[in-house]
Image (spheres, rainbow, N blue to C red):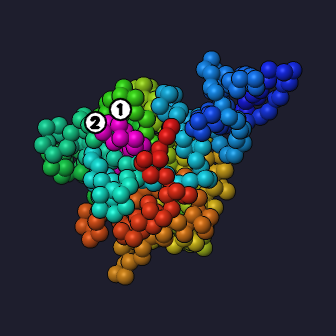
Amino acid sequence: MRNRTLFLVTAVLLAVTMTAQTITVTNADGSTKQISATDAGTITYNQDDGTLAIGGQAYQVANIAIDTENANIATSPVAGTTEAARRLYRYFRNNYGKKMISSVMADVAWNNKCADNIKKNISGKWPAMNCYDFIHIQVPDGNGWIDYSDITPVTEWVDAGGIVQLMWHANVPKSETTTVGTDGSGVTCTPSETTFRASNVLKEGTWENKYFYAQMDRVIAVILKLQEAGIAATWRPFHEAAGNATAKQQADWTKAWFWWGYDGADTFKSLWIAMFDYFKQKGVNNLIWIWTTQNYNGNSDNYNQDTDWYPGDNYCDMIARDLYGYTAAQNAQEFKEIQATYPNKMVVLGECGWDSSNKTGKPQGDIVECWDAGAKWGHFMVWYDGNAGNKSGTMVSDAWWSSAMKKANADIVITRSQVKY
């Protein structure tokens, strides 16, 4: 990341040179505009008439402020070269450490039901982001229940002011001879349920190679439709890759949870980079890439960090962590450790919700309490629950959403109506 020198020249004989990351312009009417230093170039200010010229565009301003916060974080995404991607990335960056951007997972893939429930049944507000999963992209076309080529749910969300998240539970056939059903049958993400091996994906001529590249092409076709529509999105593939593989005491259960991590860190990193390069080769330029760390799994005595699984600074924009049933104090511990490990990346809560792994269960810590404890996640995303007894249909309580969206949104949490980028 490089700094950019900006020149501020007044109508009188005064020239000031300063180093900055973000310029916040306050107009005479009180509205503001934030401009990345990399996009600003030379700035000319005429104090006689209050006119500020930036990149050939003039503004009537009340004042100008230079923001040097987050100076260690890049001012543009690693692969998002479209204007929409650059603006979205700057929006995340400008709010990082100041406010959290709210988000919810779609139920299950290509809809806005949970987000609508939060608005209509709980808080009167929509989350700022909605996350869509390509989990069923492998289902043959004409299945009668999901059509990824119809991007209407996404465009409607964006037209209403929302931000788009994308992820991919990359399901694979259970064997080379398995036929994927129109009902979604015959596939899995779980290594023990398939002969599909990550170590074969990058070997030309293998069935794994042919299948995975064909599925990437299906995903890319949809993302390019979004790009043509002027839509940028965060992109979180291959999540939770390490699983329990970083346990210090290895046992049968200390394995990766998904096929993309089952063959180890080096294979995983090769897969990530291959996807990154292939997406770029195919012209995908509208994504902000998010890698999900397992960190310590909340227990540094029994787990090592998964730094060996990190694909590298040139291949991701944000670091996510998925936490279920973690207290505010545990959220803060995880956030601070991840931020210290990856100081030049924004740290976000990729998934959160109720931990139902035991009979009693554990609720996710109140997001306001998490923030106050020091877990200043760039954004949080709550997972859905098709069997939930609450009105939101997600893996947190209605009271959790009420706290996040009603009590805190003015100071901490950004909702959809507040999104401006």
Front in this rendered view, residue 127 or 321: 127
Q: Is residue 48 visible?
A: yes
Residue under numbered circle 2: 151
The answer to the question of whether label 2 and label 1 lie on touching residues, with beta carbons closer than 8 A, is yes
Q: Residue furthest top?
A: 56
**Residue 120 on image: x %, y %:** 29, 58
**Residue displayed at 56% across by 53% down:** 99
Q: Is residue 162 part of the magenta span, yes or no? A: yes
Q: Amino acid under label 1?
A: Leu
Front in this rendered view, residue 334 or 409: 409
Is residue 153 placed above or below 397 in the rendered structure? above
**Residue displayed at 54% across by 41% down:** 91
Residue under numbered circle 1: 226
Q: Residue furthest bottom?
A: 360
Report helix, strand or loop for mark 2. loop
**Residue displayed at 27% across by 53% down:** 113
Report helix, strand or loop for mark 1. helix
**Residue 32 on image: x %, y %:** 59, 37
Q: Which residues are magenta?
A: 155-172
Is residue 59 placed above or below 369 in the rendered structure? above
Q: Is residue 171 visible?
A: no
**Residue 215 on image: x %, y %:** 30, 37
Q: Residue furthest right?
A: 13
**Residue displayed at 62% across by 64% down:** 374
Residue 34 location, quadrant: top right
